[in-house]
Image (spheres, rainbow, N blue to C red):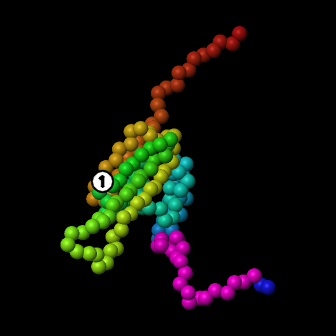
């Protein structure tokens, strides 16, 4: 026996998760992971995970990190942001209309949707002063960095006896 399994090549197959990403998305994610290796430490191992939703832009500023998440079709009330034990989590849950007056659906493509995406915040980020703004389907989070105190070290000479 050869160990090979015969497969019907004409039968439809389920697409893999990576097939939903464009080649550009894969190259871009790999490039960012290599260019900013500390983001894995600061924002979690799977920050640049392929196929993650919502898609995000991350801007590294001198005093903060900004995260922009694209969440089209949801209102501000459908989205929550939480920080628990150093993990920032974005939740989204939109409810579909159940009933329509004086009619019935002929085709229904808009469904209820929900998501959750989490990021581990590094110790160099301020977990308590995060701000959030939601405008036209874009959630913008500002995560301040902890700026080390740059005062002169307190040096004292110790006499040797």
**In which quarter of the view is residue 109 placed?**
bottom left
Q: Which residues are magenta?
A: 3-23
Q: Nearer the viewer, residue 91 or 60?
A: 91
Whether residue 148 is visible, yes or no, is yes
Residue extending furthest toward the top: 161
Q: Is residue 6 left or right of residue 100?
A: right
Q: Does residue 92 belong to the magenta stretch?
A: no
**In which quarter of the view is residue 58 placed?**
bottom left
Q: Residue at x 30, y 52 (%)?
A: 77
Q: Does residue 8 belong to the magenta stretch?
A: yes
Q: Dividing the image into 4 quarters, which one contains the N terminus?
A: bottom right
Whether residue 60 is visible, yes or no, is no
List x then y, in percent, for residue 10.
Answer: 56, 89
Q: Residue at x 69, y 13 (%)?
A: 160
**As displayed, is residue 1 above or below residue 105?**
below
Residue extending furthest toward the left: 102
Residue at the disc numbered 1:
76
List x then y, in percent, for residue 153.
Answer: 52, 25
Q: Nearer the viewer, residue 57 or 70?
A: 70
């Amino acid at each position: 026996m050869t160990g090979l399994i015969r497969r019907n090549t004409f039968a439809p197959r389920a697409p893999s998760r990576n097939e939903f990403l464009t080649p550009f998305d894969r190259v871009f994610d790999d490039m960012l992971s290599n260019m900013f290796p500390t983001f894995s430490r600061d924002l979690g191992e799977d920050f640049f995970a392929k196929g993650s939703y919502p898609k995000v832009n991350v801007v590294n500023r001198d005093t903060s990190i900004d995260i922009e998440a694209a969440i089209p079709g949801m209102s501000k009330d459908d989205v929550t942001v939480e920080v628990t034990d150093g993990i920032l989590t974005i939740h989204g849950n939109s409810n579909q209309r159940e009933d329509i007056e004086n009619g019935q659906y002929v085709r229904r493509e808009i469904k209820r949707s929900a998501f959750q995406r989490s990021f581990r915040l590094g110790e160099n980020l301020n977990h308590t002063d995060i701000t959030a703004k939601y405008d036209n389907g874009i959630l913008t989070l500002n995560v301040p960095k902890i700026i080390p105190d740059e005062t002169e070290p307190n040096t004292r000479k110790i006499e040797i006896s």
